[in-house]
Image (cartoon, rainbow, N blue to C red):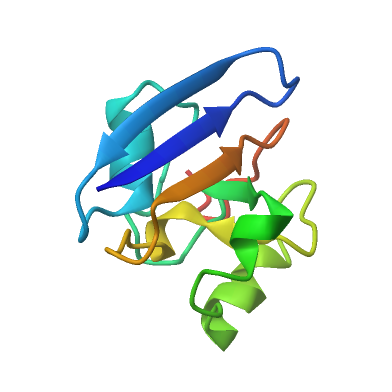
Amino acid sequence: MTLVRFVSADGKRVVEAEAPAGTRLLDLAQNNDQPLEGACEGAMACSTCHVLIKPEDFDRLPKATAEEEDMLDFAYGASRTSRLACQIWLTDDLATLEVKMPAASHDMTGR
């Protein structure tokens, strides 16, 4: 199980949720009322599931693919520790993970 701490964009609200290995971070976030749209449903055609990973946790995740890096170029407020939640799958090796919500998002799907 992984304990995920979702931190609001302003840092004032924290929601904790546990999930087993194999859970997609986007699904866990949406199931816990986090403001991640995921407009493309994980097809990496938008950046509406962009999150900021705590720096200490970022290096414990598998590296982003070139396709994900390209999509992050369109993410609002992207930083060195930005990832798309649709591309992060929880593993047994990941006991905890802290994720901060960005202040806004860009929907690249044109909807």
Figure check: 15 above or below 80: above
Report the front residue among 71 and 109: 71
Residue 48 visible in rendering: no
**75 sits left or right of 77 in the view:** left
| Identity of the residue furthest to the bottom in this view | 66
Q: Residue 63 in the image: x percent, y percent? A: 55, 80
Report the front residue among 55 and 103: 55
Q: Residue 75 in the image: x percent, y percent? A: 69, 54
Q: Residue at x 68, y 37 (%)?
A: 102
Q: Residue 31 in the image: x percent, y percent? A: 27, 29
Q: Residue at x 70, y 13 (%)?
A: 12
| Identity of the residue furthest to the top in this view | 12
Q: Residue at x 68, y 58 (%)?
A: 56
**25 sits left or right of 10 in the view:** left
Q: Residue at x 39, y 59 (%)?
A: 94
In which image quadrant can residue 73 be found? bottom right
In which image quadrant can residue 27 be found? top left
Residue 21 visible in rendering: yes
Report the front residue among 32 and 15: 15
